[in-house]
Image: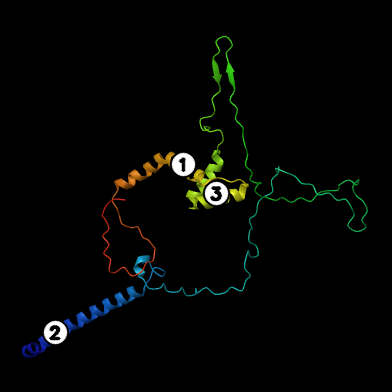
Amino acid sequence: IADAFEKGLEAVEALVVRQNTLILQLIERIEVLENRQSENSGDSGKPPCGDGCKKPVARTGGLRQKSGRKSGGQQGHQGRRPEPVEKPDKTVVHSVCNCQHCCTELCDIATAHTERRQVFDLPAIEIETVKHQAEVKIRPDREHRNQAPFPADITQPTQYGPRIKGRSVYFNCRHHIPPDRSCRIIQDLSAHHVSRAMVIESSRRCAEKIQPFEQAVKDPLKAGEAVHFDESGLRVYDTSHISFMWPARPI
């Protein structure tokens, strides 16, 4: 400041202009940092890991106002329901035996017309046991023994079929239900106990069969460059003292 004063008014003005410019830049930078500090993964595109270890901010109520209308479908709304079928799988007739007013017997009276309603439901799940018999024939003249072959997938005296195996794989792999609970679900639905080993073995066989498909999907991914977009929303305790070194390699 003293040097600028000795150089004259122009030097003082230049000094003040430089300081004002720096102050405005710092103010703008502070506003950006303050806004960024207040953001979280719930109100911006910030990833969950950027929220830190502090408790998530409670979501505030929306700005939507009450419309005053009842909940559910409104007047004129086109509803959706199962459409009646022309040929149902089963027909149950409910007969009229007595008059509802005077109790007169009506069993011999002809039906004027019928009111119809249809119920859509799942059939009862039952275990179906199929017995396979392979014929054995012996040629009389040479005593050659000939036996009909069993299907390729039937290899044991007793075994489970593809449908119950498929459901066990669906529960265990698609919905991540543990093998023991998958067994319990099948038992509750079909009243038939299956073993935990069956669920595990079915999942393993399924994995072997889809291996070519998995390889066809993984090969293009391995050949590409990693873009490092993977993000985990898992919240952990303070890990500032731990140094993470992620390997820069393809997926």
Q: Amino acid at mark 1?
A: Cys
Mark 3 residue element: helix
Real-space Cα separation, disc 1 to disc 3, in angstroms: 17 Å
Q: Counting residues from the N terminus, which is met first, the one under dot 1 or under dot 3?
A: 3
Crowd class of label 2 (few under 14; some 14 to 19; many from 20; radius 10 Å): few
Q: Nearer the viewer, mark 1 or mark 3?
A: 3
Q: Amino acid at mark 3?
A: Cys
Crowd class of label 3 (few under 14; some 14 to 19; many from 20; radius 10 Å): many
Q: Counting residues from the N terminus, which is met first, the one under dot 2 or under dot 3?
A: 2
Crowd class of label 1 (few under 14; some 14 to 19; many from 20; radius 10 Å): some
Q: Amino acid at mark 2?
A: Leu
Query: Mark 2 sits on what residue?
Result: 15
Most extreme residue toward the top is 141
Q: Residue 85, image x and y in percent?
A: 69, 46
Name the residue located 30 percent from the left edge and 78 percent from the top edge. Answer: 31
Name the residue located 58 percent from the left edge and 48 percent from the top edge. Answer: 186
Query: Mark 1 sits on what residue?
Result: 206
Q: Are marks 1 and 3 in contact (CB under 8 Å)?
A: no
Name the residue located 31 percent from the left edge and 47 percent from the top edge. Answer: 222
Query: Mark 3 sits on what residue?
Result: 183
Front-most of residues 42 and 170: 170
Q: Are marks 1 and 2 in contact (CB under 8 Å)?
A: no
Name the residue located 55 percent from the left edge and 17 percent from the top edge. Answer: 145
Q: Is residue 162 above or below residue 134?
A: below
Q: Are marks 2 and 3 in contact (CB under 8 Å)?
A: no
Q: Is residue 57 above or below residue 192?
A: below
Q: Residue 22, image x and y in percent?
A: 20, 80
